Image: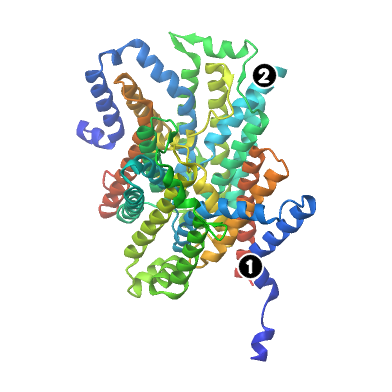
Amino acid sequence: MRPLQFIRSQTQLVILVVVFLICAAVVPEFLNERTVLNILKTVATSGIVAIGLSVVVIGGNLDLSVGSVFSLMCVVSVKMQNTSPWLGLIVPIVLAVGVGALNGFLVTRFRLNSIIVTLGTMSVWAGAALLYSPTIMTVPGTFYEKISNSAFLGIPTYVYVFFAAAIVLQVVLFKTKFGRSLFFQGVNPEAAEIAGINKNRSTILSMVICSICVAIGAILQTSRVGSGYPISGVGLEFSALTAVLLGGVSIAGGKGSALRTVIGVLMLQVILTGMILMDIKHDWQSIVKGALILVALTLDAWQQRAAARNPGGLAA
Amino acid sequence: MKGRLRQINYRQAISDNRIFVFIVALFVIVQAINPGFITANNVKIIFQNLSIEGMVAIGMAMLIILGEIDLSVGAIMSVSCCVSIYLQPYGILPAILASIGIGTLAGFLNGALVVKSGVSSLPITLGTMGLMNGIVYVVTESQSVPGTNKSFLYVADTMIGGINLVIYLFIALVVVFEFVLQKCYFGRSIMAVGGNRFAAEYVGLRVDRVRVLVFTLTGLLSSIAGVMTAARYNIASGHIGEQTALAVITAVLIGGISLSGGEGSITKAFFGYLFIISLQNAMRLLKFPPDLSTIITGALLIVILAIDAVTIRRNQFK
């Protein structure tokens, strides 16, 4: 592959590098070891949610309940930790399988729009988290401290967990039958059905994977912060979707990858960190995220129209 | 004539108007448990709570009939409320006009973005929602900013015959938009586009213009709701309208308007929202924890959708 071709096919990576260089040029302390480490730490927890969400989006669905599920898993994990550290790890993940399966069941069994279904489950789990634990809870045991304090080569272990999850999902998406059928159904659900792909199964599976990722993210978050907060996931679906779209995953489905989402997550965090270091107020974050969603959406629509005009071209 | 009368399908008629069954059931059950439910005072409270976001429900009903959706309605409300509060020192009328103007413009931009980009309206309005919420957060610096002009409060709460002005305004809007939707060319075009966009285009309707116009009207209605919020609560905050989109979409769907578009009425949306507000009121009277009512609203949305999906499919295979 010629260099120019590679650059054109990796638009998001190029944008990430450019954004990073701009931030580094404007703010001198940006290239600091601490800043970069902080970006990686912040990215690790919310980033797992984003790569889980990207699996759902590739299949042509959307999950708006990730934020509420995140809140719920945070408080469940901390409460279970009171009984036994292992329960604090296992119960959220088992619950997540149920939560994801419920979303998937509602979408496939009743052929409902996933966005509306998850809008409903979003408020159900948000209420459940607050009902289960109305206030903030601190982590009593040392088990979480072990997770958050362990480090390898100066980088916390959970950062590796994030990248490992991304690589595993990348393999699942591109090397398994499930992954291929997910792309197929994302591009053209009718054709996928005619071709004999079990659409219901892959939809449910994608939503279960997403919820498991959310639970892992929640466990890492509680161990990093050292407490469970019943509204810690508010607005997370918004930033996760921003990251997914920035990574070049198409909202129409059928295009994207876990590693591209990692690029999107990094891009969003570099921009937000840059803003903080430039002393731009926290209030601006929502504006920037909203604008980035719109830019990413229009870029994607524009690319798809170009691809439709020029089948087999690079944009496809 | 006789033959036609006999053909009325009672089951169909009940399932088409199930919202009335829901409301009657709710009122009977709650009244039996707590006699304080149906009193002149409590019914007035229900209507006061209903009337502001109910205006948003009118717009959302038209959008869903059209086959679109708008998640940014709460954010538009919040922006208009904010503008009303900040422009109060310059007089009541300029503040109201500016708020409504900005809200309408926001609705128009939503519509234009959806039509021009070709992306579905959900992610687009998710983006504009974040954008507009963010603007309110920046302007108010994430604080609650109180209004300065006390006479602004009369905009919503002037009493005529013991009933607030805002309730009259809401009822008037319901009547006007119901007339437009059922009897006017524009309203029929909304139904046609929602039923089958390509067929509508084929017979020569200006589909894109209808779509942009309905988004604009929703912006207009949301901004009126925003002005009324400012007048009622006298405060600007980024938290205003956070739950509006979910509540209003649930109301429209519970009212019996199908997500697939093409049919429905403003009256159904009105009664759907009346049901939700009465339910919330009842849960407060019966001392349910507030978080439980969030859960119930969400669960209700899902259950209603599932019932809809099952009945629609059964009718298809008949």
Local crowd size for mark 1, using a 10 Å CA cut-off: few (<14), some (14–19), many (≥20): some
**Which of the two residues, A59 or A273, is positioned nearer the viewer here?**
A273
Local crowd size for mark 2, using a 10 Å CA cut-off: few (<14), some (14–19), many (≥20): many
* Residue B290 x/y as whole percent: 64, 39
Disc 1 versus disc 2: nearer the observer: 1
Q: Quadrant of the N terminus of chain B?
A: bottom right
Q: Which residue is mark 2?
A: A81
> Is residue A260 visible in the rendered structure shown here?
no
Q: In the structure shown, which secondary structural element does the residue marked by tag 2 occupy?
A: helix
Residue B17: image tag: 1
* Residue B273 x/y as whole percent: 58, 56
Q: Quadrant of the C terminus of chain B?
A: bottom right
> Label 2: chain?
A
> Is residue B203 visible in the rendered structure shown here?
yes
* Residue A25 x/y as whole percent: 22, 19
Q: Is residue A208 above or below residue A158?
A: below
Left or right of residue B176: residue B18: right
Residue A213: image tag: none
Mark 1 to mark 2 CA distance (whole Å): 49 Å
**Which of the two residues, A201 or A18, is positioned nearer the viewer here?**
A18
Q: Quadrant of residue A240?
A: top left
Left or right of residue B69: residue A121: right
Cβ–Cβ under 8 Å for marks 1 and 2: no
Three-letter amino acid code of the residue under disc 2: Gln
> Label 1: chain?
B
